[in-house]
Image: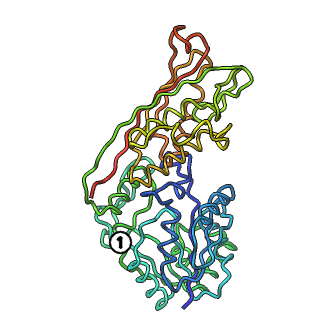
Amino acid sequence: MKIAAVIAAGGTGIRLGSRVPKQFLELAGVPILLRSLEALIAVEEVCEAVVALPAAYIPAARGLLAGRTWRIPVRCVRGGETRQESVRHAVEATRSQADLILVHDAARPLTDRATIERVIAAAWAKGGAVPALPATETIQRVSAAGRILKSPPREELYAIQTPQGFRARILRRALESAREAGFSGTDESSVVRWAGHAVSVVPGSPANIKITRPMDLEVAELFLEGGRGVVEPRIGHGIDYHRLARGRKLVLGGVEIPFEKGLVGHSDADALAHAVCDALLGAAGLDDIGRHFSERDPANRNRPSLEFLAEVRRMLDSAGWKIRNVDCTVLAERPRLAPYRDEMRRRIAGALSILPEQVNVKATTTEGRNAEGRGEAISAQAVALIERRIR
């Protein structure tokens, strides 16, 4: 049997509050997209994989894929305006003469081998199958005004998961027929059922959660850890200071800010990013920014300091540390930084592969005192909390 795997990776991370699409966020040091892909590719019958995602993120996805050696072809295609359209594009892009097609959410990185095999067996025998869990709470139909309309029998209600599996011919025809008729389903099984085919349900897994909200990342990590171990927290503090001079760009938190002066340094002299680097390195006991990104190294000349942050994050990942939050303060008399703070938060969070809500950026003046107050310099301070589990 030949199986083609389709990964729907159109998520934007809006509900996570992330500037980085959720499929690129890391779960225990591995991007969510790669975890979801690896789960399907581990099945020997899977002979190719196609990832559907927004065109703007295809280069980033290809960069992730290029860092791994895959036993089968893995390709990226442009998704559509809807999940259904994205899946149709990916299905059309499959090149093998697949007998079955598995469609999986990129945001479900913890699907297990047993669930996948149950779906494959039922889809091969009956044409289509989905994993599901029975509802454990009472589910109500509620009006837009917030009034309960109906209480469906709970024994008939299931939470549907992925991967969903279908005989290739059935899924292809159903998606094409839906396109021609203008039908829009909530998932692939609803499209296949609309086209007149039965879909079977097999037991899903409680661990097969969909990463949608910030708490889902925490729950997923607990599943990966098996709930074992004691958490070791660490706190680090970082300070950085740079002179202001004409002829330099002013960059803080990865944001270029219009101003007649910029900070002087070997790199882009981003004092805020440097302070965060030192806070994280200090918390992890990994020395300081000067040790890792020397001003004597020509490779660091004019280098964006957000790259330093990304490298520090990788150092922490390798040592088993998880970044919990970063709190920063910038001391500057001018320019006014309030309009740029949210973008600073987003860029710092993106470099660290965490959520913007885990980063706080404040700005204050020194009321005309010292070098910052005289407009001769800008400094930044940061405090970081990290933790790791001790087995």
Q: Position of residue 375 (x, y in %)?
A: 61, 13
Q: Give residue 149's quadrant in the image.
A: bottom left
Left or right, 4 with reference to 206: right
Work out whether residue 69 or residue 118 is closer to the camera in this orientation and state it. 69
Work out whether residue 108 or residue 190 is closer to the camera in this orientation and state it. 108
Q: Residue at left 46%, top 33%?
A: 360
Q: Position of residue 353 (x, y in %)?
A: 50, 49
Work out whether residue 161 or residue 42 is closer to the camera in this orientation and state it. 42
Image quarter where the N terminus lies is: bottom right
Q: Give residue 208's quadrant in the image.
A: bottom left
Left or right, 368 with reference to 279: right
Image quarter where the C terminus lies is: bottom left
- Vertical relation: 130 (above or below) 31: below
Q: Position of residue 305 (x, y in %)?
A: 60, 38
- Vertical relation: 384 (above or below) 184: above
The residue sitting at the right extreme is: 247
Q: Residue at left 59%, top 60%?
A: 10
Looking at the picture, the colour scheme in use is rainbow
Left or right, 367 with reference to 183: left
Left or right, 230 with reference to 23: left
Q: Residue at left 62%, top 31%?
A: 269
Residue on which the image places disc 1: 205
- Vertical relation: 170 (above or below) 230: below
Work out whether residue 282 or residue 202 is closer to the camera in this orientation and state it. 282
Q: Position of residue 191 (x, y in %)?
A: 56, 74
SS at circle 1: loop
**Label 1 is placed on what type of residue?**
Ser
Q: Residue at left 44%, top 88%?
A: 121
Q: How many marks?
A: 1
The residue sitting at the top extreme is: 368
Classify mark 1: residues with Cα within 10 Å, few (<14), some (14-19) or many (20+).
some
